[in-house]
Image (cartoon, helix red, strand yellow):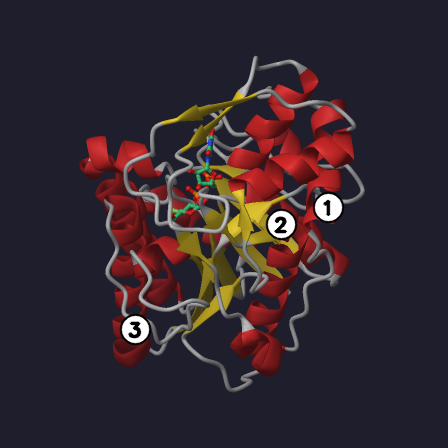
Amino acid sequence: MRFLVTGGAGYIGSHTCKALAASGHTPITFDNLVYGHPWAVRWGPLEKGDIADRERLDQVINQYQPEGVIHFAAYAYVGESVKDPAKYYRNNVGGSLSLLEAMRDHGIPYIVFSSTCASYGIPEQIPIPESHPQRPINPYGQSKLMVEQMLRDFRLAYGIQSISLRYFNAAGADPDGEIGEAHDPETHLIPLVLDAASGQRPHITIFGDDYDTPDGTCIRDYIHVSDLAQAHVLAVEALTTHQPVQPAYNLGNGQGFSVKDVIATAEAVTQKRIPVQIGARRPGDPPRLVGDASAIMQDLGWKPAYADLTQIIETAWRWHQQQPYSTQ
Ligand code: UFG
């Protein structure tokens, strides 16, 4: 089937395009290339455009007649969203509305949406189930939650079927080394730790070691990007084949690793000493975020293939060594 993949030139989007192609589908990437990379689009056409540009969306939809949409295109810097919320509401919420209206007007009935564990805010319960209250503590998480709510209303009013996938910490790279993480600026822990391992940064700063966790550093649920990608394929196929689904699923490993665990594992994988400094807490960081992904395992048969932190860091390291953050 043909799927329009907004943000298909980005990190998770490009891995999903590869997984779609491996399952016999055609991904049509629609990306404004603000953060995405043309070199990451290898498994289908690239159409440059912004989801807020309704005319351009109409053109591309008319040309390819996609049967469904996988929607990644969004800004995703939590700190920036606090400083410049307008940018997040305009792009993530306004852009999604434009896309959803285009889907309604063209009669495209299926969408898988890239949501986030940041929509839960500070968790009251670990692991976090999908039924956990959603009280985001920053505009980024709020913008994703608002789109989840729009999807609910578009389902009821216009019959657009959707699944929101709430990711925990996406990490790692394509095990074949064809694509990987290349954010600019980079803020995520694993690529920064690998920069410190390879000497591209003098050290990694741990944002706080006085949290109420066993080693004092924050705990996160790292999930391999190819496992995330596979979940999108299962989700969109479940929609197009009318399987019974929940409106939203968590995507995590159900296992938490601290910042110090990540650094120690990276030292073992890279065989390099990683210099560490202890810094202040980063505002808005919950001490512990671990997801319960049993629902998607049960309903869609999803099973992570790279659940182990060592495997995740090994794939990231392979990518890091061959293509260190090329932004061309
Ligand atoms: N960290 C450091 N030093 C760094 C970078 C990160 O100690 O230089 C720590 C953070 O404080 C955090 C952990 O490493 O405890 C992971 O940080 P990331 O920035 O890699 O990821 P986040 O957990 O902040 O981000 C993830 C998703 C976001 C989502 C957010 C919700 O990537 O999309 O969770 O809190 F919004």
Picture coordinates of residue 246, whole percent (x, y)? 44, 79
Lateral position of residue 200 relative to residue 286, left or right: right
At a point 50% along the width and 70% down the height, the residue shown is 292
Say which residue label 1 marks: 310
Say which residue label 2 marks: 225
Q: Which mark is residue 152?
A: 3
**Residue type at the position of mark 2:** Val
Q: Which mark is residue 294?
A: none
| Image depth: mark 1 or mark 3 in front | 1
At a point 54% along the width and 66% down the height, the residue shown is 67
- Tell me the element at label 3: helix
Picture coordinates of residue 109, whole percent (x, y)? 44, 72
Q: CA gap, disc 2 to disc 1?
A: 14 Å
**Residue type at the position of mark 3:** Arg
Instruction: Indicate which disc, 1 or 3, sits on the residue closer to the N terminus.
Output: 3
- Tell me the element at label 1: helix
Q: Residues within 10 Å of mark 3 (few under 14, many from 20)?
A: some
- Where ligand 1 lies, by quadrant? top left
Confirm whether residue 170 shows in the render: yes
